[in-house]
Amino acid sequence: MNKQLISLNKNEILNQYNLTDRNYYYKLKQGLNNYSEQQINKLGHNTYLIDESIIDEVFTTHRKPNKNDVNKIKDYILSSSFNYIGCIRPRRSTLKENINRIEHIFSRIIKEHTPAYLNLFYSIENNNSQPSQYKEQHTHLHILIQTDKKKDFIQKTKNILSTYSDSRVFFEKYNTQWEMEGKKYTIKDVSSSDNCSYLSYRARS
């Protein structure tokens, strides 16, 4: 049997993906229908083995929220699992400038890594303080990423982010010990779809 298969821990999955029992078994049923026995396998009552690399694909909510509905975006973020989390602070950047910046960043990440899929959720937060001579509000960026890519992803992505930031870049693997806190922090100051949205990519099969 495939050595990558691991035993599913139901309670861990329920907490990590914010699922009900009903949703858990529904997604498991879909997984059994969509993947081979070499990737997901039912051994007995409530006993499943799964390829670790497909856990996110099986249990994450796949239907993306309406980009004009900030509440649905926030709900999606809070009910989903993410692989990576980050923050960059460009110098004297407005909301509009950081929206353009995140689109450039996204394009470069896709070009660098050529993933099978990648979802980048972002929020743009006002800086706590800025020099009084500047009339427009300056902002910084928080990001959450879902992707199949793992090898060298952190360092290569951090190198990309560094070219857009004027201070030390924070970008690392999303630590499940944070549970909801990392996601809540990312959207803590979100008030409209102007400062919270997402970009998605899926390779053609």
Image (cartoon, helix red, strand yellow):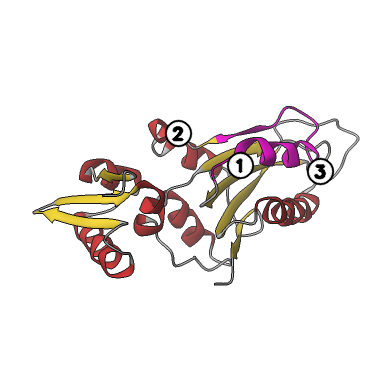
Identified at 69% across, 31% down, the residue is 169
* Residue at mark 2 to residue at mark 3: CA–CA distance: 29 Å
Q: From what the image shows, is residue 25 above or below residue 152?
A: below
Instruction: Specify the amino acid type for callout 1.
Output: Phe
Question: Where is mark 1, residue-wise?
Answer: 153
Label 1: few (<14), some (14–19) or many (≥20) C-alpha neighbours in 10 Å:
some
> Which residue is labeled 2 in the image?
175
Mark 2 or 1 closer to N-term?
Answer: 1
**Is residue 166 magenta-colored?**
yes
Residue type at the position of mark 3:
Ser
Few, some or many residues within 10 Å of mark 2 (<14, 14–19, 20+): few
The kind of residue tagged 2 is Asn
Which residue is label 3 attached to?
Answer: 93
* Residue 35 point in image, percent of width and height: 33, 65
Q: Is residue 3 above or below residue 43?
A: above
Residue 200 pos. (x, y %): 59, 62
Query: Measured from the top left, where is residue 24 in percent x and y?
Result: 24, 56
Q: Specify which label sits upstream in the sequence, 1 or 3.
A: 3
Q: Viewer-nearest of labels 1 and 3?
A: 1
* Upstream in sequence: badge 2 or badge 3: 3
Q: Looking at the image, which residue is at 72% across and 56% down? A: 111
Q: CA distance from mark 2 to mark 1?
A: 15 Å
Q: Residue furthest bottom?
A: 205
- What segment is highlighted magenta in the picture? 150-172
User: CB atoms at circles 2 and 1 under 8 Å apart?
Assistant: no
